Image: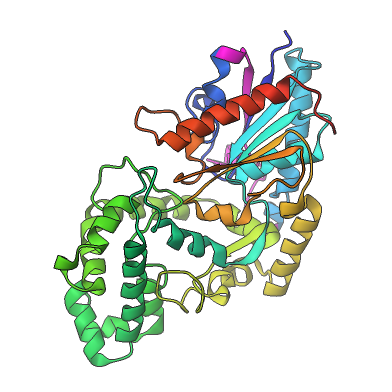
Amino acid sequence: SDAPVYLCVGGEGPPLDGSVVVASVHCNVAVETLPETGAIMFALEHRYYGCHNMSACPVDKFDSNAALKYLSSRQALADLSVFVEFIRQTYNLPSNKIVTFGGSYPGMLAGWARLKFPHLVHASVASSAPVQAVVDMTGYYNVASRAYAVSDNNVGGSPACRTAIATGHATIGQLFTTSTGRDELSKLFGLPASYFESRSNQASFAGNGVAYFPSQGNDPNCQQDACNIAKICTIMTDTSTGDEVARLAQLRKKQQGWLEPLQQEFNAVRLNAAADYWGYQTCTEFAFYQTCEVGSDCFFTQGYLTLNVTESFCQSEFGITSDTVARNVELTNLYYGGRASAGTCLLYPNGEVDPWSSQSILNSTSTYVQTLWVPGASHHAWTHPSTDQDQASVVAARSTIRKFVADALSQDCYT
């Protein structure tokens, strides 16, 4: 058969299983085209991230950083190239055109597979792929803040909502500084006034937002209280609740019932992991340390979530200095090209309310590289299984991706 081959690239998520070629968070835009294209689909797990128990790990034990020496995007791409050769021989696919798919870090790998192995990978859909590594990622919360002013495509934000969130957090920063202010916060949020005296508690409370503010994971169809931008903005623009700080307190209260169990589950997963795999890769390759610096567009209480805070674990956990982190990021961008990377038959889709878009390719770098802007969409929302409640922009994005793949398969993609 000369059917195309679709390869779903694994990344830092949970271990893959057979369901990934049936219903995939990262690659369902490929899954859903299988009937019409007759494509053959494979999925490749990322080294280390499939390490759900020691028998599945690439090393015998994690007693030193040396155990993580094969944990890198370069090794993952080398693994991918070997896997491509394996499936060609095993399944008699000598010249079938291969298209890689992925979202987020797997999207980065999907695109880089085309760049680094154009003789193996014919085309790529690199969804929400932050290919420009950066140490101080102020863009993350800048975009997250702007997302709360987006009103169309069922997002439900407004400039008034964004301003209310920013004003509330700025006021909290001022209230920290006086005993009267701390007493007021105690009454509103139900924590002892003494809790707000230490800078570490202030940072934990408001440096990353006093509540959950989804943008990367915004779901216009979620059912819980205050679970998306629209529902949060309904609360934050309701002046009958009180001033902006009182509205933040109301928002926090509404989320606690469903958010706390999820947080506990997330913490349990992290505690049970053999090592902080993604943390290690940020120190050795990408950084991506999300900060809320004074003077940025971040709408949380500024000046607490700073670079020295967010990257300090590199030194404490892995013995990697901040200077080395910066050099690693520089080398990553030199090796892959960052936003200036070239290539052919590449598509970079990004969502409007996705903070990771700040590090992706939003404008074509050449006539052979295409970009796709998805209004109102969150982090690779179009790669999730389709539902009848999907945003119109997400539905349209899937159609554009299908056309891109069909066009790429019908042509010789120059190397």
Residue 261 visible at all:
no
The type of colouring in the image is: rainbow
Q: In which quarter of the image is the C terminus?
A: top right
Res. 340 in view: yes
Is 9 drawn above or below residue 31 in the view shown? below
Which image quadrant is residue 147 in? Answer: bottom left
Magenta span: predominant SS is loop
In the rendered image, residue 164, in percent from the top left (x then y), is placed at: 31, 68
Q: Which residue is drawn at 26% across and 51% down?
A: 258
Is 381 placed left or right of 337 in the picture?
A: left
Q: Is residue 177 above or below residue 263?
A: below
In the image: residue 14, left or right of residue 194: right
Q: Quadrant of residue 366?
A: top right
Q: Which residue is drawn at 33% across and 67% down?
A: 165
| Residue 391 pos. (x, y %) | 40, 36
Q: Which residue is drawn at 42% across and 53% down?
A: 215
The residue lying furthest to the left in this view is: 240
Q: In this view, does 167 lie to the left or right of 35?
A: left
190 w.r.t. 230: above or below = below
Q: Where is residue 378 in the image (x, y as percent from the top left)?
A: 46, 46
Q: Is residue 61 magenta?
A: yes
- State which region is magenta: 36-65
Residue at 20 percent across and 64 percent down: it is: 250
Most foreground residue, 68 or 300: 300
Q: How many marks?
A: 0
Instruction: Say which quadrant the N terminus sits in.
Output: top right
Q: Residue 345 lies in magenta, yes or no?
A: no
Residue 57: x %, y % from top left: 62, 41
Please give left or right for residue 221 compared with residue 349 in the image. left
